[in-house]
Amino acid sequence: MILNLIRFIFALLVALVGLAYLAKTGHGVNFQAKPYFMLMAGIVLAFMVITVDLIFRRKNLSAISGLFLGLLVGIVLSLVLGALLNQVAKVFLDVHELREYGTLIRGGKLLIGLSACYLSISLILQTKDDFRFIIPYVEFSRATRGPRPYILDTSTIIDGRVADIATTGILESQLIVPRFVINELQTVADSADRLKRARGRRGLDVLQKLQAMPKLEMRIWDGTLVDNAKFEGVDQKLVALASQENGRIITSDYNLNKVAMLHGVTVVNLNDLANAVRAVVLPGEQMHVRVIKPGEAPGQGVGYLEDGTMVVIENARDKIGGDIDVLITNSVHTSAGRMIFARCTTETHAVNHLANHSRDST
């Protein structure tokens, strides 16, 4: 949008230069009422400035910095090219010809200056995210709180736990949400499948909740990836963005976690974080679980705790749909989540009773 505005202003200024040249040479418009013309020009200019300010309510500091830097580079370049044009004119034209073509030379220098400013601004705005080593705008990135920003992927946003984590105030670094992740969320939210549509809308609601937090800094990333053509999938783009922005990816996707680690990108896995703060469950403890579905092995039943932890229960397939007391036998922690293995307490009591009976008999 800002580039289109710059192009419009460039075309308008070029047209005004041509109009002024015609008026100067007497072959076109001749402004007789100069005070009234200046008054009208001032009103029009003020109206244009106010309109632009109202249209662009949310200012982008990176774009504004690029605009001023491009303008500065363009002015310096136009001065150099103007001086070069003067030297060329002095070499090929005599004094009389210099006076005759003086207006034309000055108009050419002005057009060269406008073209240089336009090209400089356009080039810098389109490449400011690719070449960060150029010293004048190495600080274009918005200042962030904390050492390194966090980059959210689609699974993390849909999961929703990141909003609960942010509510605690533990996230002091900036949260970055790439535009291509938002586009993927929008695609999921527009899906014909009811479940996918609900997940996508949940993700969009989580983003709105994060944006509404006053103490959390969240930024929508609209930049350009270096060698963007090489990255096709969203996961590859996330890894490339984390490397480019020196950020850390927050995800609950097991595959993205592995890919990022292969590329040396720091990953914060929500499942690992949940396991780290979850209460430790030791073998021998008892708990009350509702058996939901059959397990993979014969006779197994599967239940879930309130936090979503899967509990695999031996010989509980015939108790599906009921609430039973189980005895924990083992607990496994992985990046994909935590699994608890258990067996029915009634079975445990029966085994202990048989063992005691056989011991008494001997």
Image (tube, grey):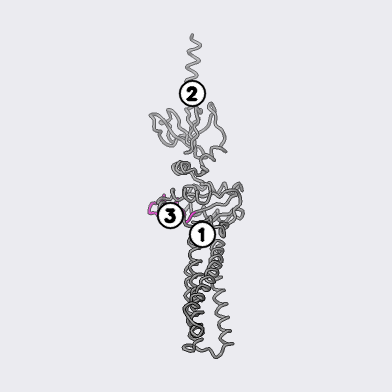
Is residue 353 depicted above or below 259 in this figure? above
Among all residues in the image, which is located at the extreme bottom? Answer: 32
Circle 1 crowding by C-alpha within 10 Å: few under 14, some 14–19, many from 20: many
Frontmost residue, 181 versus 243 = 243
- Residue 181, magenta (yes or no): yes
Residue 120 shows which numbered tag? none
Sequence-earlier tag: 3 or 2 = 3
At x 38%, y 51%, the residue is 193
- Helix, strand, or loop for circle 3? helix
Per the image, the residue denoted by label 2 is 348
Per the image, the residue denoted by label 3 is 228
Magenta extent: 178-199
Sequence-earlier tag: 2 or 1 = 1
Frontmost residue, 6 versus 205 = 6
Residue 128 shows which numbered tag? 1
Amino acid, disc 3: Asn
| Magenta stretch secondary structure, dominant | helix
Instruction: Tell which tag, 2 or 1, sits nearer the viewer.
Output: 1
Q: Please provide percent x and percent y for residue 245.
A: 52, 51
Amino acid, disc 1: Lys
Q: Please provide percent x and percent y for residue 185.
A: 45, 53
C-beta proximity under 8 Å, tags 2 and 1: no
Could you tell me how far apart the alpha carbons at marks 3 and 1 are, in whole angstroms? 14 Å
Is residue 180 depicted above or below 335 in this figure? below
Q: Please provide percent x and percent y for residue 288.
A: 52, 33
- Residue 247, magenta (yes or no): no
Q: Is residue 297 left or right of residue 209?
A: left
